[in-house]
Amino acid sequence: MADRPSQPIFGRRWLLASSGTAALFLGTQHSKSASTKTTNAEPIPQPAKASASAFIERAFQMRQKAIELGDQAYGAVVVRNGVIIGQSWSRVTIDEDPTGHAEMAAIRDAARRLASRNLNGAIMYSSSRPCPMCEAAAYWAGVGQMVYGRDGDNAGAPKLCR
């Protein structure tokens, strides 16, 4: 009987999907401990006209804020029914959090503001295509569509492990 290399119990896809879920869960758990600071968050200023281009522009404003704060150049907003319900810039460097991607932080912001992890029907606008971790988090949060880049490329509905 020939020796076969041992196969991992769980595959790479499972690992990527579970890491996104764990990061979202841990991020919202961390946020709950600081909820006294964020529950009374200032309202998000809305664009004069709700449109895809306005939401993309806001994602790029978040990207600029990340640059100004010395973080990675990424920004994202979460929109439902034409209203921005969450937004953020990259927080990886400033929070020393490897899961602090702009998309993850925007999802966390929306969940906190709504007091719900259910973002069904929302659209996430990002300055660049979300990574697998962020896409998995969007999937688990119920985000219905992802749009990214200056041209508003449609990445479709988030999936686990593209």
Image (cartoon, grey):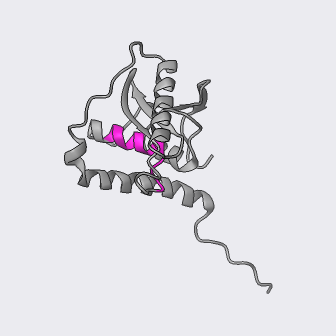
Location of residue 29 in the rendering, given as x and y in whole percent from the top left corner: 31, 55
User: In the figure, 149 relative to 13: above or below?
Assistant: above
Residue 160 lies, with reference to residue 40, above or below; the image says below
Question: Is residue 128 rendered magenta in the image?
Answer: no
User: Magenta segment: does it hold 101?
Assistant: yes
Q: Report the label total.
A: 0
Q: Quadrant of residue 14?
A: bottom right
**Residue plotted at (40% across, 20% down):** 82
What residue is at 44 percent from the left and 48 percent from the top? 91
Seen at 47% across and 16% down, the residue is 51
In the image, is 96 to the left or to the right of 74?
left
What span is in magenta? 98-111
Farthest residue in the right direction? 2
Q: Residue furthest top?
A: 49
Q: In screen coordinates, is 121 left or right of 74? A: left
Residue 73 appears in view:
yes
x, y percent for residue 44: 32, 28
Q: Name the main secondary structure of what is drawn in magenta.
A: helix
